Image (cartoon, helix red, strand yellow):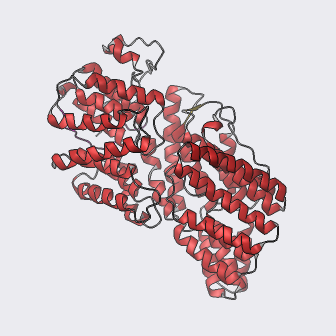
Amino acid sequence: MVFPKKYLVGIFICISMIGTNCKDTKYGASAELASIGLLRGELLLCGSGEFGEVQFSQACSVETRETFNLAISLLHSFEYIEAEKAFAKVIDLDPSCAMAYWGVAMSNFHSLWAPPSREELKKGSKVLEMAKDLAKSPREAAYLNAITLFYKDWETVDHKTRTFNFSNEMEKVYETYKDDKEAAIFYALALRSTADPSDKTYQKQLKSGKILESLYPDQPNHPGIAHYIIHNYDYPELAIMALPTARRYAQIAPASSHAQHMPSHIFTRLGLWQESINSNLNAQASAICYAQSLDSTAHWDEEIHAMDYLVYAYLQSGDNKKAIEQYDYLKTFKKVFPANFKIAYTAAAIPARLALENKNWTSAATLELPLHNLIPWEQFPWQKSILYFTRAIGSARSGDVPAAEAELKHMESLHTSLVNLGNGYEATQVQIQITAGQAWVWLAKGNSQEALSMMKTAMTMENNTAKHPVTPGEVLPAGELFADMLLKLGKASEALAAYEADLKLHPNRFNGLYGAAKAAEEVGDYEKAAIYFKGLRSQVINSDSDRPELAEANAFLKLHHVNL
């Protein structure tokens, strides 16, 4: 659906947040609506204005239908700020439209991201309270009841429990209204939001994916179907199932920065680096356009999120120059919004990846966090642990054991904080890093047996835990670190097997291919070494790489008369 030009580049009238004044009489909003912090104003959308095709039948006035469908399209591509503004516009035009209040509550849920803030939870609760006495059909009442269960008792009931309550209620909506395609789509999303990160059978993801795939043939331009299929299959074992959809999603919603970015989740899982780069360059450009519409000096989280995936793909392509350009650009930022978990993760991960992927241990050991004045790092212990992990590995690999052990203590403190907060997933991620860091400390101390044992433990923990959607991949895969350790200890045959196992989970990683080639060379399997060295060369075909590993690859292939 192409929306009218008036939606594409509007003047931002105001955003009324809790505790501020905003004159919104132009839209006929009540003082009560303004008081709950409802986002309002003209929609700020870049590009073509295309967000896919959605037809969500609802009982609101006919004049709101187009705006309501736009709001749903934005919601399905996680364009939450603009989705809320579109739903607010529906309320302004038709204050009796119960489903518009549902839409505002859904816009503040963002089920696959970090839990909503207190302000967002307050807003969602209050807007649902306002909708309670509005006339609604049984189907609309069912939708509202489901999201109400997420917000109910949010001050005393944990986020995970409330998310399950919402999912269970959406299942009832899905079962009751069999012909309601949107109910099926939102239920599929709710299923994905309750998936256990440690469940390597991917039971819920596969169930959700099956529902979505059954809808896709009849609605090939629906943004939610394509988007959620990608999220369901964003795992090494499942990624190939989403490749056709990933290549389609960006075309479905070309005006959405998030839709431009999301295909790169699958491209990354499959090691398709140039496609990932193209995807994230488009996402970055769209996000910059959106941010400049709000504040020409600010950078939106979608731009910064895309940058992490860009740097990762550039590094796997051997393109240090372009990866460093992104980092230098990041360091120029003076204002970011919102200062959330996505921005914190990227800010910590980019410099860590640059140092660790290039095995620059001195740089890794002395790493500093960028944007330290813009991000409340105390709120992001998992992300901050990336700094200490990088320093620990860098120090251990440089032989500075006391410095490495000091970094491990910082990580242990962050791990305790996460445990106390009840954040089991992030606590596990930090524990994996601690275990891996300690393994390299043991190796630096000369205890290779304990080092290998701990590194294997870290690898097993990581392989039994799903990757978080915020990251293109671990800062350094534990399986690859295990293989590195084996190779360093002269266990080339075991190292080769370990590299090959990790490459199945992380296809076409630059250092994985190089390590496998070197291990094969050391055991005398020159045919296999040639395969991996040629694979390494194929990674850099689109880059002007100066990585020394390529010189080794070229020398080996020339020596053994392999066709270059």
Identify the main secondary structure in magenta: loop
Q: How many discs mark residues in the rendered view?
A: 0
Residue drawn at point x = 71 percent, y = 60 percent: 437
Relative to the observer, which residue lies in front, 413 or 279?
413
Left or right: 45 in relation to 495: left
Res 451 → quadrant: bottom right
- Spot occupied by residue 62 in the image (x, y as percentages of width and height): 17, 27
Residue drawn at point x = 40 percent, y = 43 percent: 111
Q: Relative to residue 56, is residue 496 depicted above or below?
A: below
Q: Relative to residue 252, is residue 206 depicted above or below?
A: below
Segment colored magenta: 47-58
- Spot occupied by residue 13 in the image (x, y as percentages of width and height): 43, 18
Q: Is residue 315 visible?
A: yes
- Spot occupied by residue 334 in the image (x, y as percentages of width and height): 66, 31
Relative to the observer, which residue lies in front, 74 or 348?
348
Q: Is residue 3 visible?
A: no
Q: Relative to residue 24, is residue 153 depicted above or below?
A: below
- Spot occupied by residue 227 in the image (x, y as percentages of width and height): 37, 50
Image quadrant for the C terminus? bottom right
Left or right: 68 in relation to 463: left
Residue drawn at point x = 43 percent, y = 13 percent: 22
Relative to the observer, which residue lies in front, 189 or 544?
189
Relative to the observer, which residue lies in front, 99 or 217?
99
Image quadrant for the N terminus? top left
Res 536 → quadrant: bottom right
